[in-house]
Every structure is written in C-alpha cells, then in structure tokens.
Amino acid sequence: MSGGLRRYEFSEKLAEMLGESRRDLRFRVTMMVSAGVVKPGPRGRGSPLATPAYGSNLLVGAMAAPQQVHTIEAIRCYWELEPAAIASEMTTPGIILGLSTEHTKIDISTTLPIPFTRLRFGECLTQLLELASSKSTCGGLASELFGIWVSRGYPVAGLQIGVWSKGRRSVITQRFELSEGERPPSWLDPSRNGIADPGLLHTVFLPASKLIEIGMLTTSEKKKNPMLNLGPKIAKFTDLVNLVRQGRYRIQWEKLLLTLIEVQTWANKVGTQDSRLVEITDFGSNPGNLRMFTYVPGHLLPAAPLVVALHGCTQTAAAYDLGTGWSELADRFGFALLLPQQHWTNNPLRCFNWFRPEDTVRDSGEPSSIRQMIEWMSVNHDLDRRCVYVTGLSSGAAMTSVMLAAYPDVFAGGAIVSGVPYHSANGLQEAFESIFMGVCRSGSDWGDRIRAASSHQGPWPGVSVWHGDEDTSVAPVNAEESIKQWADVHGLPLNPSIENEIDGYPHRVWQGPRGENLLESYTIVGMSHGQPLDMSGGEYSCGTVGPFFNDVGISSTYRIAEFWNLPETLSKRQSRTKSQEVTIMGQTGERTFNVVPVLNPTPSDTNTSSEQTNIVEEVSADSAGVEGGNPKSGGIPLGIDVQKIITKSFEMAGLLKQSEDNPTGSGSVGKSAPLGIDIQGIISESLKAAGVLAESSSKTPPSESLSPETGQVGESVWQGEGWELISNRSGRAQGEPLLFGYASSGNDCEVGNKIRSISREVSLGDHPTLSYIRRLKLNAAANDHTRARFSVLVDDLAVDEVSAVGMEHTEGEWMQRSGIDLTPFANRTVKLTFQVAAHSNVCNEVFAKAWVDRIHVRDVS
C-alpha cells in the first residue's frame, strides 16, 4: 500500500478503513480546522500531507466521539488522558480478598522506543503512527502492539501490548485516564446536559494491523532520519552484517549471525512453552535495565545456596534454563536459582554488554542490577550469603567474569563456559577482536585488572573454566587466558596440581596450600561453541539439546555444581534440619497455647504464622462491640462469655438448675450440679487447654491494644483525614470507639483517585502479629474501570487488602483478621495505616466504607 497521502485522500481512505461515511469524516475534519486543532490549508487534492499527528487527532475524534458534534471535545479530552499505573490493581472486574499476587509492578518494557508510562494518550498514538509510517520500524510494531481501545461510555483509553511474563507471551493494557481535577466530556457530564450513565455507548477497538495500515498512509515529519529497527526477532540480520561488512572480522561475524538466527528461533519456541521461572519486577532501581527471573524449589531448606545463571546472545532466561537444566538440579540439590535476562533495547542481539565500560565496573549498569537481584533473593528467601555462585554461557560467561571481578566479596565461586577474561575489551571493536582472535597478556596483567576492579583483598572465588577446542565463535585461547588471570589472582603457578580425564575429556585442577580446589579447566575436544551436556540418562544428565547446547557426553551443569560442592551442601543441610526438627516442633506446640483464641477455631487456627479470617457474630456497625462483657478481658475471646453461653445451654437442657440466690445466671456460684460434678469447672479447664479460653491475663501473649481514642502505645494517637471515631454506641464500654473511613469519587463529577488514610505509630517486638475486626462496603460497580479498595499498611507497605473493580463487595458481618505477620518490621517503631480509596471516571459515585475495631499488635514469641 502506498504511503504519503494528503489530508483529503487520507480522510477518504480512513473512512473506508473504519467503515464510516466519507461525509462524516469530512465534517469532522472541518470541525478540527475551525477549532484550531489542526492548521488550515488548501482543500481537495492540494491539501497538505497527512502527518501522524494529524492522523492521531482524526482517529481519536472518530473513535471517541459518539456524535459528530462531540468531535472536538472528544479530541481535547481523550488526547490529554494520563497514563495510569498498571501495577497493584486488577485490570478486569472482580474482587480480591487479601494481598493480590499481582501486587508488584508489571514490567511494560518493550523494544518499542516509546515511554508509554510518561506520555499522554494522544502523544502515544502519534508515536505509534510514526513507527507505522516507516517500513524499517512497522515490523517491530506489528510484533509488539496488540491494539488500542477507547471507551465512549467513560473517558478511559488503553494500549494493549504483548509482553513476556513468567515464560508466557501475554497481553497487558496500559490504561489512560482523566487527570486529577479534570471533568468528563459534555456527553457524560450531567451539569452540561449529559448523562452520567449513558447506557449503550460502547468501547471501540482498533487492532494493531489496522493501526499500521493507517500509519502507512501518513508522512512522518522525521523521514529524513529513519530509525533502524533491529526488532525483537532480529528480522534484519543483513542490517547487522552491514555494520561490520568492511571490518576485519567480516567472515566470522556473518557466520556468527547466521548461527544466532538458529539460536533465536529455538529460544522463541521455548518461549511459547510453559516455563518454570517466575519474573520479579520490583527488585531495585535496576540501573542496567535487566529483567529478573527466578526458580525456587518447593522444598528449599533454610540458608540455601544461590546460583546465578546468565544466558548467551539471543537467548532468554527460560531457554537457557531449559538447555542447561539448572532448575532440574535446583530441585535435586535444594538451591535457589536466579536468571537475569537482557533487554533487546540494551543490546540488539540480547547479549550482556560485557565490553561497555559502564557495564563492567562495580555498582554501575548491568552488574549493579544483577547485584540488586542477588540481594532481593537473599533477603526474601533467607539464603546463605556465603554460598552465592555465578555462571554463564558466551556473553553470559563474559558477564560472569565481570561479576566475579567486580563483586569477589559476593561470590564463593563461578564458572565461565565459552567466555572471555575480565576486561579483555573496551568497546565494540575490541570485543570483536577478543572473541574472534583472543587477546594474550601476561598473568600479572590479567590479575591486576581483577584486583583493580574492587577493594577486595581475598579470599577469592573458585573458578571453573569450560571451552570447546573447535569453537569458532569465541576463540579457545580465551579459556587459557582466563586460567592465567585467575591463577595469578589466587597466587597459583600455571602448572596444574592435577591433570586427568573426566568422561573422556582433559581436566586440570589447581589446588591451594590446604589441598582445596581453587581453579579447574575442562577442554571439550571436538566441540564447537556452546554448553556441554550429557543426555545419556544417567545420574549426571540434565538439560535439553538445542543450538549452543551440545550433547557431548559430559554434563557441565552437574560438574560445575559438583565443583561448588552443592550436592555435599545439600546432605549437610538435610542432616542439620532433621536434628533441629524436634526442638522446632516443641516451640510450635508451646506457641499454640499462647495464641489469643478465635471464635469457631479450625485446625489451621493453631498455626500462628498464617493469617486467619473469622466471622464475629454481630449484626450492624451501630451495635458493634455490644457483648455484655469487657472485650479486652483475658478470659473472654472476642468479648464473648463462653462459660455463660454453655451454662445457659445446660440450664435449658435441665442439666443445671439456677439457684434463687443467683438469678442472673452468671458465674458458677448458685448452680446445682447433678451428682455433685462440677460441670462448669471441667468445661473451663477444657477450654483453657484447648486455647479457646485464656487462663489469665498474665498468660496471654504481650499485646498492644490500639484504642482509637487514647494513646496507649508510645503516646501516639491516630491521625489522618476521611476517618472518624464512632464512640457513642449503645452498650459500648466507654473509651472503646471504632474507626470509620469513607472515600468517595464521582460525586459532583469530581472524578479520579480519592484516598483517605488514618495512621499512628506502633513499637514492635521480635515476632509481631496484627489482628483486627472489620466491616466493609466497597461499591465500584459504575463501569469496568472504576475501583474501590481497603488496605492495611505498615510503613506504607500493604499487609492486608480488599480490592473491588467494576463490582460491589459488602461484608454483612464483622470479619476478624488475625495472625497477620509483621516480622519483616520487627524491633522498630512503624507507622500503622488503615486506608480506603475510590476511583471513578464518570459522574457516578464510587465509594469505599470501612469500619475497623479491636486492633491488636502482639508478640507471639
């Protein structure tokens, strides 16, 4: 289809593509010119060229305005829609009780050079049409963009983008909504004769293929500087070849690129399969713009080791894991696995940038991102910081050399598979020389480069070096140079301590003064570039054969794990865990009797480490807390007199007779028991033993009752807005008010996110837990994108939450939440916050109401 149409021709063609009448589009263009949205110009065939900006204005007007008369207001309203965060909130109607598994930020990074999260909807649409107008960039757009949609019933628009997440290709939506203080367009504003609930007004969807066709009809104002799009599938390898066609290493480079096509094709197939990996998106500032994938076995032992595995060029974390079999060994040996993944935007071949100065030094670029990932894994999975290892293939092996040099204090060992020494190149041209020819230096020169990379003085990580002697992608001499480098760092001679054969291949070992293996080398005779595998099905077998994963009868993955003593480490940890098992069980049993009891306990209620939800049988918020007893009494769980209820039951059954001296029926005095058996005493003791009735206040766990009205804890009081204290309730003990919070959006067309919070400071002990009771009414049923939420936060981090999108959620009875673990905040003073939030995009009310009572922080140790 030819491009470069003029405005007149463009509007005619657009009408045909959208299924609209030509007259309709002409009228909208006339309105755009009259309102100054676009500059005037000659009409007909002499009109100016249609630019992407012109096309996006007309497209928004046609998609968003339900009638012609609304065209200009639709353009001005929808063009200015601001990007909404696609992170902790649901994107489809539903209710989530408790913290969502999607509470972490979603990674929207793509190869498209558009900062979606920083641009308004109209700006994003213009840039998409810019990409579509160029043949060199429309291919990448077709593979990344799924489509765009605009709702006429409420001012919300979306870009649907294809991304990789957890080993699957899926579509996520970058929403755009009204900014704070803006009003909906006139047809949705009752104050301007609009209708807040327009009924049949619908959402208009434009698929990516249609958008690209429209973009190809426009003429970019940037045509003089077309952008080379290498694309996520590396479709234009010839363009890359041309970058070095006149270079010294042309033949090697072209051969490598052809091989990488096969690797990329295989990696794409792997990407369509189910992956065992989980992606983590919020692990730090990520200065290197890398992606983080992890695998943690279900049986992970305390203080387990961590293996960091770095993929090669054009590979993915999932493809590298499948090829090497590292997650298989993680299941067998009980270690955690971290697999960083490169972005295409960082490197068009998705190689780690081991040759760029900013990505080869400590606390900078890609090494810093990987270091942040390691820290996240260590903290969140309680790993042994003394047992962190790193390995990689090809460019991942080169980055392994970087990590071992930049962070020798972090790693206990490393393995370089078909890689190069640290600091063998400074820039792209030197990188070509290093991989294709190899750079030879003295051992001391190589060693000085590592010693200069950090202030570390030793001990140094042990290193395993692997290389095929027929590797034409990375010269085999690089393995010998890596050996020289690490032998010098360890102060070892070049002659090995041991020379033998393992699985038929030459194996060399350099040992320290105490006989420990500090450095080893495998030369895989006859093997080209790649990772050695043993697929015989024996004990050492793991991984999958594919491009750069070679079945040569020796498992590099298993042998590297063996070099790091991971099998032996597993055995020691299992033995230590078994020896501690009896003590741990004893502590758990003792702790169970100290838990503040809950109503109608289930077997899971005795586990103090898990959150619990129980229904507290009270009728309404106005009668909350009316129990005929002190709710804070140590002997009355949740304010309910268990003894009194049972006594009344026995009286009604005729098993107990009420004495005239005690007509109230309270207590045990005055009760005539059959056969002189103290039934109440037996029941009381049974309840105490079961943990349903606390023996005395002195035997309950340390507890801080956070009364809303008084500052009982650290003299701190509740502070915030949108919340109030309800204290004058029938039958309620004085000084026992409850908290009531109310957030509303959409009233009087005041749309947007409305948040109301109340907070106070709380000092926590060694093993703190939180409990409270609540009633909620969340009304978010205005449309698919209206939201209401209730959250409990500690130092602004959510620990409990209920979310509603496009639906209503009402808790008709008081719900108890108990055993909420606050251990991550132990031994410090924190800010405890209760929060309600509502978000409406139309002139209909969306609200969140919450009643909160009996807030307790306990130390369960």
Image (cartoon, rainbow, N blue to C red):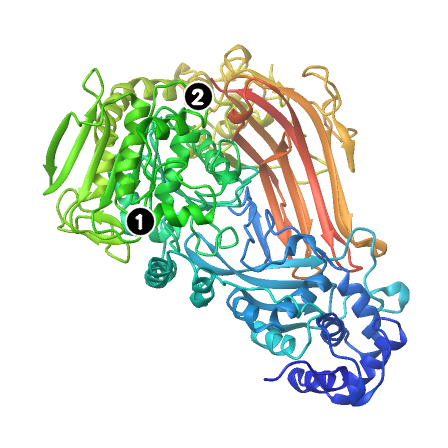
- Nearest to N terminus: mark 1 or mark 2: 1
Specify the farthest residue to the top.
698
Above-or-below relation of 219 to 834? below
Q: Which residue is mark 1?
A: 474
Q: Nearer the viewer, residue 761 or 377?
A: 377
Q: Which residue is mark 2?
A: 683
Residue 204 point in image, percent of width and height:
66, 73
Q: Amino acid at mark 2?
A: Ile
Q: Nearer the viewer, residue 672 or 597?
A: 597
Above-or-below relation of 772 to 352? above
Snapshot quadrant of residue 384: top left
Is 637 positioned to the left or the right of 715 in the image?
Answer: left
Is 251 positioned to the left or the right of 12 in the image?
Answer: left
**Is any part of residue 341 visible from this angle?**
no
Residue occupying image coordinates x 55% and y 42%? 98
Q: Amino acid at mark 1?
A: Val
Is 743 positioned to the left or the right of 583 in the image?
Answer: right
Residue 609 point in image, percent of width and height:
45, 29
Residue 246 point in image, percent of width and height:
43, 61
Structural crowding at the residue carrying mark 1, measured as other residues with C-alpha within 10 Å and reported as few (<14), some (14–19) or many (≥20): many
Above-or-below relation of 630 to 604? above
Q: Secondary structure at mark 2?
A: helix
Is 187 positioned to the left or the right of 824 in the image?
Answer: right
Q: Nearer the viewer, residue 279 or 498?
A: 498
**Is any part of residue 661 visible from this angle?**
yes
Above-or-below relation of 743 to 446? below
Structural crowding at the residue carrying mark 2, measured as other residues with C-alpha within 10 Å and reported as few (<14), some (14–19) or many (≥20): some
Q: CA distance from mark 1 to mark 2?
A: 79 Å
Q: Secondary structure at mark 1?
A: loop
